[in-house]
Amino acid sequence: MFKADGDETARAYSISEWWLEPNTTGPGAHAHPEDDVFFVIEGTMSILIGKKWIDAPPGSFVLVPGGVTHDFENRSQQRAGMLNFTPGVFEPEMEGIAQWFKDHPAGDVR
């Protein structure tokens, strides 16, 4: 769910809300030139930054600098949610990302 989209921000950035069920993998490790920011609002989200996974509890603010490989997943046994702040170029990719999650439903992450 977009909280602020490109139309509202003149394509400068978007803010999206993500909810992952227990044991759900994310979109896969990737990198892009722009920074990526995550703010965990509920549960614990595991976030990959470079080669290191961190567990981010509620209230965690995670900044992934542009060009750094990153990913996220919910390795816990409870639902987890976060806000994601990204540059405006992210929004057109949402259709493919949504399809990826449909093709990879909740299950064992590791």
Image (cartoon, helix red, strand yellow):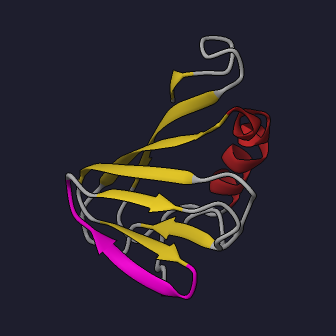
Residue 25 appears in view: no
Q: Quadrant of residue 9?
A: top right
Disc tally is 0
Provide residue 27's location: percent of width, then percent of height.
64, 62
Residues shaded magenta: 50-58
| Place of residue 81 in the rendered image (x, y in percent of width and height, measured from the top left) | 34, 48
Q: Residue 9, relative to residue 60: is it above or below?
A: above
Q: Residue at x 51, y 30 (%)?
A: 1
Q: Nearer the viewer, residue 53 or 9?
A: 9
Looking at this view, is 84 or 18 the one in front? Answer: 84
Q: Position of residue 41 (x, y in %)?
A: 26, 46
The answer to whether 77 appears left or right of 3 in the picture is left
73 in magenta: no
Q: Verify whether residue 52 appears in magenta.
A: yes
Residue drawn at (39%, 67%) of the image = 74
* Residue ID at (58%, 30%): 14
- Find residue 22 and report its image quarter: bottom left
Is residue 82 shown left or right of residue 7? left
Q: Along the horizontal axis of the image, is 99 left or right of 9?
A: right
* Residue drawn at x 70%, y 67% as measured from the top left: 67
- The answer to whether residue 5 is above or below residue 30 is above
